[in-house]
Image (tube, coloured by chain):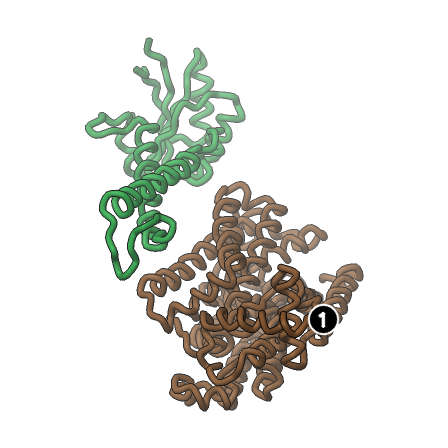
């Protein structure tokens, strides 16, 4: 049995406390009036530093004249933006909403990112079960530990969605009746994009995932002490069923929770694209936690070949992600249809560094680092590659949410980093707590011997 | 000058594997092994150096990528710029997304084909070459191990029979 070391527990709590403080600071630092918002941005431009000053902005210092100059400058940028829905409102209000959204968006991106990791692991786990894979049963308990974060993580995301529905923030512009009243396109979609149906759908997704997570874990633990393979067979059946549900619900989830922040824009492979992101992040986290546990003297039955296989998946799915990213990008870039291409125009104009940096971190880096077969067996190499891949996929989610919610006012500052720290702490706490609940070897799994002797 | 070799035939890959380990342990030099299918782990048991074909493959891939970039740059940018879908070919970088599929395909094409050709040449296989295979049964269901002989005929023969060889014979190697 695994015992949660005090040092790791303390580290998790420190992360949560620091993160929570940073998030609270982020909410307090957001402007509450239009004048404040204008002053903050004017100040930021004065210092020639776009984002840094938006978080640390000293308020109300800028003179009237500067604020006006900024307005003129801002109007230009406004023209290039995708927020056609904001036609009626003036620039100040728009800016205020963006800056008020900033801490919310930071919270939402991190909450979603960590939820997505455990959802990706759940899908990976279900695939191993449904395929009756022989190599992976020694890793099942690690995967089950990671998926235990899914329900709490998804409920946090759900709470943020409910708060959006209650107009506590403006993450989802289609939730604003004022905007919808002036927007024929959103009106046409309101049969699907309306708050009650949106929340009901979210509950259905979370309920389905949570139910599979609960029962697969229950059967898996019951199999340890069983005298036959009936629990194993049940797990096979529900895993196959879950995968069907998952592919549909994950795709719809990505439209609802991510794509709808840009309600005019759509991409038909978006569900796949988000899936690739969560899949590679999930596999990376399985590898990292396995290596961590091994370094602490647990999981003595996991050998180099298991790590090698996980690293192969990290490599392969990174390339798969790039393939989907590029397929989405190239078709939109080539066809150049205004309502589609604005998505990438905003990202390349306002998000150049994260947009292209993400490609380096998620594609070029893993491609070159993990190509060599021997490197995939070096634990520290896998960990280092994993850290870069995880950061890259955080930036991926950042790029999906931020342009529509905060526009060109983005910055990876205190609120964003704190969001990551808070959810990382919570994730570590929940996952390692769950790992202590059952033996780390699923000893009655019929494939466990094959898995222990897995050799590549 | 012809050298003498001893050839032992086996009819099971597991028996062959344990025989290889035994012969290696007795410090005899295994010249070659002929098998009807790839035997997993045989290269390690024989003490062969790890293959470097992956490195050549990577280099060929780089060549393919370079060829694709040079080719598309010449065709689409320098020689005959065309305006396709409102995207005039003024610079390679601006039009790069359109060339990525070609860059990818040629990378794969070069890496795969040149790697196979390298493998054939390195294994000294080319069209119309006469087979080096000493016994046709190794293309069906037998495994053949060839060990160098140095005036130790009887001892080696006894050892090979002991390891489970179904047939042992001594021939001249040309």
- Vertical relation: A388 (above or below) A407: above
Whole-percent x, y for residue A347 in the image: 48, 64
Residue B160 sits above or below residue A222 on the image: above
Q: Position of residue A384 (x, y in %)?
A: 61, 49
- Percent position (x, y) of residue B123? 33, 29
Residue nearest the viewer, comparing A456 with B53: B53
| Camera-side residue of B130 and A58 | A58
Query: Could one spot residue A150 in this view of the protein?
Result: no
Give the colour of chain A.
brown
Q: Residue at x 53, y 26 (%)?
A: B25
- Rendered hue of chain B is green
Q: Residue at x 45, y 59 (%)?
A: A321
Q: A111 and A32: which one is in front?
A: A32
Residue A262 in view here:
yes
Residue A66, percent from left and from top? 63, 70
- The answer for which chain carries disc 1 is A
Q: Is residue A296 left or right of residue A186?
A: right
Q: Report which residue position mark 1 lands on.
A: A61
**Which residue ends up furthest to the top in the rendered image?**
B1
């Amino acid at each position: 049995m695994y015992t949660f070391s005090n040092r790791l527990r303390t580290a998790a709590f420190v992360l949560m406390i620091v993160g929570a403080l940073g998030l609270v600071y982020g909410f307090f630092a957001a402007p509450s009036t239009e004048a404040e918002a204008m002053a903050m941005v004017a100040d930021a431009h004065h210092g020639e530093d776009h984002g840094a000053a938006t978080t640390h902005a000293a308020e109300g210092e800028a003179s009237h004249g500067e604020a006006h100059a900024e307005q003129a400058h801002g109007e230009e940028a406004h023209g290039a933006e995708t927020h056609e829905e904001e036609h009626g409102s003036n620039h100040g209000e728009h800016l205020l909403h963006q800056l008020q959204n900033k801490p919310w968006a930071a919270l939402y991106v991190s909450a979603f990112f960590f939820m997505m990791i455990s959802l990706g692991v759940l899908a990976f786990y279900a695939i191993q079960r449904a395929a009756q894979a022989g190599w992976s049963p020694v890793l099942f308990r690690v995967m089950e530990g990671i998926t235990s974060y899914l329900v709490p993580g998804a409920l946090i995301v759900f709470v943020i969605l409910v708060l959006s529905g209650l107009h506590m923030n403006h993450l989802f512009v289609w939730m604003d009746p004022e905007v919808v009243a002036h927007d024929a396109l959103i009106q046409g979609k309101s049969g699907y994009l309306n708050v009650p149906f949106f929340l009901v759908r979210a509950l259905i997704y979370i309920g389905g995932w949570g139910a599979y997570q609960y029962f697969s874990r229950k059967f898996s633990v019951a199999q340890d002490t069983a005298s036959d393979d009936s629990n194993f067979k049940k797990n096979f059946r529900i895993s196959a069923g879950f995968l069907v549900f998952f592919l549909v619900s994950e795709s719809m989830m990505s439209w609802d929770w991510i794509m709808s922040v840009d309600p005019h824009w759509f991409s038909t492979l978006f569900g796949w694209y988000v899936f690739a992101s969560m899949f590679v992040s999930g596999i990376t986290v399985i590898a990292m936690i396995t290596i961590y546990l091994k370094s602490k003297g647990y999981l003595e039955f996991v050998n180099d070949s298991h790590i090698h296989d996980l690293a192969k998946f990290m490599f392969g799915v990174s390339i798969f992600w790039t393939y989907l990213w590029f397929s989405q990008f190239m078709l939109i870039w080539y066809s150049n249809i205004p309502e589609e291409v604005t998505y990438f125009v905003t990202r390349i104009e306002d998000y150049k560094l994260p947009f292209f940096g993400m490609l380096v971190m998620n594609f070029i880096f893993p491609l070159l680092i993990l190509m060599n077969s021997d490197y995939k067996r070096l634990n520290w190499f896998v960990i280092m590659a994993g850290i870069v891949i995880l950061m890259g996929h955080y930036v991926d989610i950042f790029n999906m949410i931020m342009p529509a919610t905060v526009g060109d006012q983005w910055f990876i500052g205190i609120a964003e980093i704190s969001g990551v720290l808070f959810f990382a702490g919570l994730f570590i706490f929940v996952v390692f707590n769950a790992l202590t609940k059952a033996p780390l070897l699923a000893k009655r799994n019929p494939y466990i011997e094959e898995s222990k002797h897995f050799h590549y | 000058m012809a050298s003498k070799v001893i050839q032992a035939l086996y009819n099971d890959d597991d028996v062959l594997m344990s025989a290889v380990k035994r012969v290696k342990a007795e410090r005899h030099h295994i010249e070659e092994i002929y098998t009807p299918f790839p035997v997993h782990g045989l290269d390690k048991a024989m003490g062969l150096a790890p293959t470097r074909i992956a490195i050549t493959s990577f280099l060929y891939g780089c060549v393919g990528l370079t060829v694709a970039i040079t080719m598309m740059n010449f065709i689409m940018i320098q020689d005959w710029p065309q305006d396709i879908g409102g995207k005039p070919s003024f610079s390679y970088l601006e039009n790069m997304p359109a060339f990525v599929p070609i860059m990818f395909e040629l990378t794969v094409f070069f890496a795969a084909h040149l790697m196979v050709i390298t493998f054939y040449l390195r294994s000294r296989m080319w069209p119309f070459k006469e087979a080096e295979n000493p016994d046709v049964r190794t293309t069906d269901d037998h495994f053949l191990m060839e060990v160098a002989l140095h005036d130790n005929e009887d001892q080696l023969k006894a050892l090979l029979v002991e390891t489970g060889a179904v047939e042992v014979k001594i021939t001249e190697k040309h």
